[in-house]
Image (tube, rainbow, N blue to C red):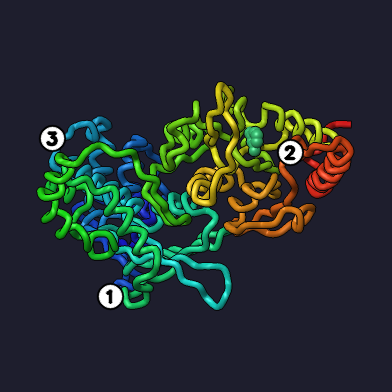
Amino acid sequence: MYRLTMQDDTSLDEFRGHVRALVAAKASPRDVTWSIGSDDLFGAAPPPDAPIAKFTVPSAYVDLARNVLCHRDPERFALLYELLWRLLTDRLLLSVFSDPLVYRLRQMEKAVRRDLHKMTAFVRFRRVDDDGAEPHYIAWFEPQHLILKPAADFFVKRFATMRWSILTPDGTLQWDRRAVSFGPGVPKSQAPTEDTLEDWWRSYYRSTFNPARVNPKMMKSEMPVRYWKNLPEAALIPQMLADADRRTGRMIEAPPTMPRRVAMPMNAPAVVHEAGTLAALKQEAKVCERCPLYACATQTVFGEGPGDARVVFVGEQPGDQEDLMGRPFVGPAGQMFDRAIAEAGIDRALVYVTNAVKHFKFTPRGKRRIHQKPNANEIDHCRWWLDRELALLQPKLVVALGGTAARALTGKDIKITQMRGQTITSRGGASVLFTVHPSYLLRLPDAQAQREEYRRFVHDLSQVPRQLPSVAKAA
Ligand code: URA
């Protein structure tokens, strides 16, 4: 009889080590018992020091095992070993879905995957300000299975620029914007309660709840009731369901209206399908309707440049020509920008260029479209995309071209005339250098002032290759 103890009960490496030794010892699954923890009351009896067996299993088994090890069922090790034992003589077993063992393990895998998916959708961070230090976001979540480690990757990528912790009864996951760490589980009493983000979730939920489309059965399958107790917005559901018929009647009778501009606070975590690359993010941004600006613009103008750029330039919003061509900084301001960065010794091909707002805002005047400055709400809405671009790029230096970019990068209204040429450290850890927007130079009425300001602009920009010689133009 072999007694195996898993120290880290979700570790594929540890499980792999055990089963290799078991197969080498020709240990039938009937003769193996498994336990979890550091001490077996009767002392573990591992297989004798037989040579480690050399055998291969289909990669689908490895994927299955990786997920099933995160299932809470204590029988998972025995079931996985039994499957492996049978696979040694029947390589095609995994495709026999009617086999009771295969079926059971597949169901377990499905439950783990579903739980992971629900965790990515239902974690709600609360903001905690510790002693004037930068904000810390803490979430309490009760997963069905042991999914904290496999979930880490998603949350690190999704909230790369925030300092956060996810607390669960089984373990805790921390991200300090540099490294991820795991700790022991904690009771719910250690998690923070209400904060201002709760209100945001509730108003968001209220505004997206369509009483005419309500399907309680589907809703409960998408947002299972067991998660409700930790979802601030779930408290609204019973009342909203009760009101649904009455509201639908009112909607049918009401005359049509223009879409309302909604204000949403920034930094609120939202449920998205995470884009893991700039190309995927750009694709997502193409259909952005997060604010009303999309309605009149020709297209989303996303940033462009190398994915490993160490310097990012952030402008205000696409102009008329950028809107038509779908590329940032290609119109008159872009030509001014190109000239100035070249003079400052920067190679445009080595930097990433984007805008704080991704749609052109204008008012029509005759046949012309006159640029309009985006307002604070539009800038804050669109930071959704900029934050993600920066999280994927992880630049060393971000150059804010003008006040709109400065607001998008710092969340504050910065006086560029006072801050130009200066560098601060942003919330995301990158340095932010402030300077004027090239259109500002184009608007100056007097040629002498324009020459003078252009010289100062180039002077500000020349800090970039000094700080990061890798973006310098070849001599
Ligand atoms: N102005 C900007 O800020 N960005 C552009 O892409 C063009 C003009």
Of the numbered discs 2 and 3, the one sitting upstream in the chain is 3
Disc 1 residue type?
Leu
Report the residue marked by disc 2: 438
Of the numbered discs 1 and 2, the one sitting upstream in the chain is 1
Mark 3 Cβ inside 8 Å of ligand 1 = no
Position of residue 189 relative to residue 148, above or below, is below
Q: Nearer the viewer, residue 96 or 371?
A: 371
Q: Where residue 160 appears, x then y in whole percent?
A: 52, 53
Mark 2 Cβ inside 8 Å of ligand 1 = yes
Of the numbered discs 3 and 1, the one sitting upstream in the chain is 1
Report the residue marked by disc 3: 98
Q: Where residue 372 appears, x then y in whole percent?
A: 58, 39
Real-space Cα separation, disc 1 to disc 2, in angstroms:
73 Å
Query: Looking at the image, is mark 1 or mark 2 nearer the viewer?
Result: 2
**Residue 421 visible at all:** yes
Callout 3–callout 1 Cβ contact below 8 Å: no
Q: Where residue 460 appears, x then y in whole percent?
A: 81, 47
Left or right placement of residue 360 versus residue 258 in this view: right
Real-space Cα separation, disc 2 to disc 3, in angstroms:
67 Å
Query: Looking at the image, is mark 2 or mark 3 nearer the viewer?
Result: 2
Element class at badge 2: helix
The quarter of the image that holds ligand 1 is top right
